[in-house]
Amino acid sequence: MIQDIALFLQTAIIMGTPLLLATVGEILTEKAGHINLGVEGMMMIGAVTGFLVGFATNDPLLAALAAGMSGFLSSQIFAFLTVSLKANQLVAGFVLTIFLTGLANLIGSNYGNATLSSEFTQKIGAVAVPGLSRIPLIGPALFHQSIIVYLGIFIAVSAWVYLNKTRFGLSLKVVGENPSFADDAGIPVAVYQYVHIGIGGFLSGMAGACLTLVIVPRWQETVTAGMGWIAIALVIFATWNPSRAIFGAYLFGALKGLAFKFQGTSIEIGGASLSLPSQILDLFPYIITIAVLIAITLGKRRENQPPRWLGKAYFREER
Amino acid sequence: MAYIQLRNITKKFGSVYANRRICLDIHKGEIHALLGGNGSGKTTLMNILAGRYKYDEGNILIDGRKAVFHSPGDSVKAGIGMIHQHVDLVDSLSVEENILAGTEKGLFPTRKKARGKIKDLAELYDFHVEPEGKVYQLTIGGKQAVEILKVFYRGASVLILDEPTSVLAPIEARALFVNLGKMKENGCAIVLITHKMQEVFDISDRVTVLRKGEAVYTSLTADTGQSMLTEKMVGHAIEGRTEYRAAPRRDIRPLLAVSDVTVHNRFGSAALSGVSLDIRPGEIHGIAGAAGSGQKELCDVIAGIAAADEGRILYNGKDIAHMPIAGRAAKGVRIGYVPEDRMDTGLVGGMCISDNVMLRRIDREKGLFFNEKKARDLALRIIGKYGVDAVDPAQKLKDLSGGNIQKILLGREIEEAPDLLITAYPVRGLDIGATNYIFGLLRERRDSGMAILFVGEDTDVLLELCDRISTLYRGRLTATLDAAGTTKAELGLFMAGGGTGGTR
């Protein structure tokens, strides 16, 4: 039993890692006042790019960077449309997801049966820390994981420090709250928006690669399975706080893990066999998100509110 | 030579001239008042100097050298700081973060030195703000202080203030003027945008009048007079106001009795607490107070837009505190409302005049299809009766001037024949002609028996127009006074929360 739970926790954390990367990226994007609904698409393009580069080069670092770059470049399409051309952010992001999903499937169409070399999976697969990984219950979850798990935590904590302790973080928050104030203060509003939309894209791309290189690990047309949308919901769940996103991502990862585990199995209750469709577990993240959204809206804490300028374009000369 | 010289500045929005070949000299150690009606181009001109707007023609010279601003940041670097009419800060951040944003160096800046500099500046101008407090906890006056600190922290030597007193209580406005005097002595150049004549004579050294985007008159303040400036602002001589005021009628039963009403804002603090007042037919009942003292909540709760958390509102003896706004007309409750933000709450800018005048009664119309002729007739009636400068009811509302928009809103509400008319800042931003017209209209309605609740900011206007005045301070009612026999100073004291309170 204890072993089962330990395995479950281990699964929750690795399943939560792509969510964490994408969520932290989207938090930074939204802090700049832009809501990018292209996360799902950027994860898809990252997933296929990372897989192909990993397949061709056997180099995990190169694969991850390539995946990140593909997400970055895709996000700059969104940035150009919404920052420079002031297009509607919701439409631009949504269209980006549709476009990138199609593009990823086109690129990956011949690689459905390809598998990564065992050499490659060894390099990036789970590594047990001697001793510590034998701690009952939490040992495997914390100390028998792929390097990407630790990278995810590092990125989330760094993002928190960046937002709350550095001058760039302060300027970023001002841009998302009140761009005309930022403009008056000499903060280059558009530059901040491009850069943080770009970081968001990079992290989403890496999140996609995390699926095709570590978790699944192969290329499938439905590999992201809505994780990009969950990440956008998680931003709200985490109330735009990267360190809270760690907790949220692992919780949602656990729900994903449960859905996976209970697929097709049935539970015996009082002699009757009850089968729980995995789709019901898939619904949980969204139900929880809606509950949090309502709690924030009714809530009294100003610090937990969305960036005030979120979703709006900034025109300097608007009267 | 003037420190800043604007030479032939021209700015067009579409095909409309907002500024046309304007020349303006700004001297150090001098307060220069920029006087003009609504839409005269004052704010546009100063937004050009602050780097927010690009201009189409002309030159800006600073210290004799040509300056080119590509962004507001460039203007700040040149030592120019602007305090905008609407407070422009980040509420969720702290005071010092608002002041320091964009100025710090290094990846992890230390705040110690900066904090000292902020405290010194605050002391110089007698501001009581905590650098680490959140901005949303401040009053509007406090927020304005933060804006001033922000501008001086960035080393400004030229300060532009856009209608700074419009959001302040009289006592705060006086403190601001004392500070402007200090800044002047320290060698700053100050531009004060205003439409209040009194402020020009209270504090300025030089005055320029703008009308319809052109600078029509410049003079040393000492060399000019009120009638001269008025004439230049309006473009023709203006007749005196009627000074008639009926005695308050105490014998009449109140139309509306508000008792112990409390309203919480969405963050849970009381925006209005335990307010009681009554309004009689045939009186103009004024509400005075600094901006954000609970005026909006009071109006909304009487009009039925917001619900009272506690207390009762009796309308002819019937409690309407929780009566939904939709069924009110059918139940004989006739309350008209001219809200503070006319373009957000009162009207729809993107719709035409005839659609807008129908908004109030559309739910009482019969049938599926919209009766366009009826709407057009009503629009034409309002245009004719209230002297709106518009030809076609199909004209989009936002293309009209502020005064004409306000006349349409007032006309629409009055045509509904309400027993009680709530008007919040009905003349804000309007020029003298439109202002006098609206005051005349309110007096006439009052004399015909309508009860009017008038929320205002200018104590002179309140004392002249109203029969009784209630003062609000931080959501509490501090006094209800007969306007006759009350002085400006008394009113100011109650608006600032002083005095013993009570009713006369």
Image: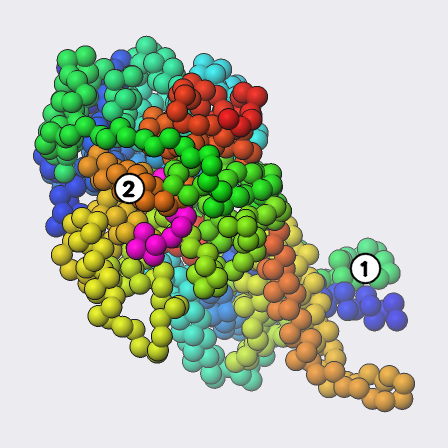
CA separation, marks 2 and 1? 80 Å
Q: Is residue A81 visible?
A: no
Q: Residue furthest front?
A: B251
| Residue B431, picture quadrant | top left
Q: Residues within 10 Å of mark 1 (few under 14, many from 20)?
A: many
Numbered badge on residue B444: 2
Residue A209 x %, y %: 55, 67
The local secondary structure at tag 1 comes to: loop
| Residue B110, picture quadrant | top right
Viewed as shown, does residue A204 lie left or right of B343? Answer: right
Residue B109 x %, y %: 52, 30
Chain assignment, label 1: A
Residue corresponding to mark 1: A138
- Would you say residue B421 sits in the magenta stretch? yes
In percent of the image, x 38 and y 41: which residue is there?
A: B282
Q: Nearer the viewer, residue B202 or A45?
A: B202
| Residue B208, picture quadrant | top left
